[in-house]
């Protein structure tokens, strides 16, 4: 027997009322979070890995389903030390996500479609100052109540930093990169006491090459700190170096190329790298996206003795 035509659940006015009640309940009993969409900069076709950055942040309300603490495996003591594997479930109204996040983004950001929350996006919990990465998006819970789907249910795990770029404009979030990223230290000098670099700003060094389309290839990094030496000399600590085309981010010293200046994009300060404190500068730029020969050569020097000596003595 067919269902009654007098009690049809697919009535737009009823669905709107249902969504309004869900939204109101989340505003009353939910928590304020910050939604951070992921942008893919480039993809390593060999390792099948992506290099991501996070440049936008949107405050939004959500409901946390976990009532007795975070779920997941909790705290584990593994062979690499203590691992915290907290997991949370966040419920965000679809209408609010489209209004706050979706309407302020293009239909395609990097290589990721942004018509709905995506795996890899981040959620910053302002209540606990913890960052979670979305692992799975469930768009059908609760399941077709009055033939409507008003919410996204997001399963997220505690975020593990892996050299991503953060430029959200929120210091608590952006400092995650400055504190956890691999860092490189250089002694830099300027011709006079010019403006010094600012913490968090990007600096670049021109490679003198182009990408074949007339665009200059630059090495780009972010300033994590600097230490005053004298009027013209500073020790600069940089994080997240990468090349503007293929990700090979290694700077050159002044002794190799005197004209290759380190330029601050915000401060305008121009400085020369005079001393490499971490042993990572190169003698020439690598423009091949898949070439790691310089890295292997430097690592191999610490393992195998390539010096041409006779172990039985010279005649």
Image (tube, rainbow, N blue to C red):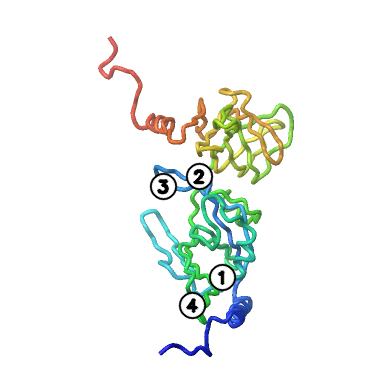
Which residue sits at x=69%, y=29%?
190
Q: Earlier in the sequence, mark 4 or mark 3?
A: 3
C-alpha span from label 2 to label 1 = 29 Å
The image quarter in which residue 262 lies: top right
Which residue sits at x=50%, y=77%?
67
Q: Nearer the viewer, residue 64 or 188?
A: 64
C-alpha span from label 2 to label 3 = 11 Å
Give the residue number, with chain letter if any, for mark 1.
92
Q: Are marks 4 and 3 in contact (CB under 8 Å)?
A: no
**Relative side of 17 to 136, left or right:** right
- Residue 48 disc label: 3
Give the residue number, with chain letter if any, for mark 4.
142
C-alpha span from label 4 to label 2 = 36 Å
Q: Residue furthest top?
A: 315
- Residue 59 disc label: none
Give the residue number, with chain letter if any, for mark 2.
42
Q: Earlier in the sequence, mark 2 or mark 3?
A: 2
């Amino acid at each position: 027997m067919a269902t009654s035509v007098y009690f049809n659940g697919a009535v737009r006015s009823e669905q709107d009322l249902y969504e309004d009640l869900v939204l109101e309940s989340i505003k009353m009993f939910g928590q304020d979070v910050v939604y951070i969409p992921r942008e893919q900069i480039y993809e390593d076709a060999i390792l099948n890995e992506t290099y991501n950055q996070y440049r936008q942040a949107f405050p939004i309300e959500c409901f946390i389903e976990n009532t007795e603490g975070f779920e997941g495996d909790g705290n584990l003591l593994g062979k690499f030390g203590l691992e915290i594997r907290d997991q949370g479930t966040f419920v965000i109204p679809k209408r609010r996500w489209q209004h706050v996040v979706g309407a302020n983004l293009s239909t395609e950001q990097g290589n990721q479609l942004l018509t709905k929350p995506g795996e890899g996006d981040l959620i910053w919990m302002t209540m606990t100052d913890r960052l979670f990465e979305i692992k799975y998006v469930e768009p059908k819970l609760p399941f077709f109540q009055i033939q409507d789907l008003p919410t996204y249910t997001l399963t997220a795990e505690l975020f593990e930093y892996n050299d991503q770029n953060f430029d959200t404009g929120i210091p608590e979030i952006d400092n995650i990169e400055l504190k956890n990223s691999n860092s490189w230290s250089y002694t830099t000098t300027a011709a006079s006491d010019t403006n010094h670099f600012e913490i968090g700003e990007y600096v670049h060094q021109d490679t003198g090459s182009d990408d074949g389309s007339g665009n200059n290839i630059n090495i780009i990094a972010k300033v994590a700190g600097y230490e005053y030496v004298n009027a013209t000399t500073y020790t600069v600590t940089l994080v997240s170096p990468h090349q503007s085309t293929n990700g090979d981010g290694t700077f050159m010293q002044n002794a190799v190329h005197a004209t290759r200046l380190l330029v601050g994009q915000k401060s305008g300060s121009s400085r020369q790298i005079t001393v490499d404190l971490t042993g990572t500068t190169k003698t020439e730029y690598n423009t091949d996206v898949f070439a790691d020969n310089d890295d292997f050569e430097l690592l191999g020097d610490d393992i195998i003795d390539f010096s041409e000596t006779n172990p039985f003595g010279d005649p």
